[in-house]
Image (spheres, grey):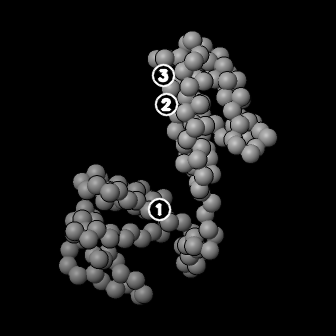
Amino acid sequence: MNDIKKEKILQVLETLYIPESQKNIVDMNLVSEIFIGQKKVYFSITVPMHPAKNLEPLRLKAQELVIALPEIKDAIVTHTSDQKINKKTVYNPKPLPGVCSVIAEASGKGGVGKSTTAANLALALQNLDLKLAILDADIYGPSLPRLLNIQGKPEILETAFDCMSM
C-alpha cells in the first residue's frame, strides 16, 4: 500500500518545476526517499545552496500538493542542499610507510565506551596476528593504559613507543 502512495506522491510532484528549468523535480532526481507513516509523508527536495531561499514557494507547493491527496493527512517537506566540495581544501594525507589501514573512533560525549571498544578491537586484531598501534588522545586523561594494565613511563622500542599517554 505504501508503494502505491509513493507512486501517487511522485506523480503529483512531477507537476513541479524548478524555475527556469524544463524538467520537473522528479525527473531531475531532486526528491529524496519518501517515508510514509500514519497518513503523514516525509521527504526532502535537493536544491542548489545559493538560491535555496528563493525556492521556498516550491517547497510549500510540494507540501500543499501532497496534503491534497485524500490518503494523506500531513506532509513534512524540507530543502536539502547538495554542496560541492572544493577539492583543493580536502585533506589528502601522504601514506604512512607500513600502514595499510586506519580505524578512527570518536564521540562528542564522554563515557560511551570509546576506549573500551578501541582496546577490545585492538586485542581482537592482535589475535589475528596483525600489527597495530593505538593512540589515546583523550585530553581529560587517557584510559587505555589502565584498560591494558600498562604502568610506568612509556618504553621506547626501536623507533616507537610501547604504550604512550598523550
Q: Amino acid at mark 2?
A: Ile
Given contact means CB atoms under 8 Å apart, are the residues at marks 2 and 1 in contact?
no
Q: Which residue was labeled with disc 2?
A: 76
Picture quarter with the N terminus: top right
**Residue 103: mark in rendering:** 1
- Classify 112 as above or below 65: below
Given contact means CB atoms under 8 Å apart, are the residues at marks 2 and 3 in contact?
yes
Residue 40 place in picture, x, y as percent: 48, 22
The residue nearer to you, when weighing 60 against 119, is 60
Q: Does residue 149 appear in this view?
A: no
Q: Amino acid at mark 1?
A: Ile
First reached walking from the N terminus: tag 3 or tag 1: 3
Q: How many marks?
A: 3
Looking at the rendering, which quadrant does residue 132 occupy? bottom left
First reached walking from the N terminus: tag 2 or tag 1: 2
Q: Secondary structure at mark 1?
A: loop
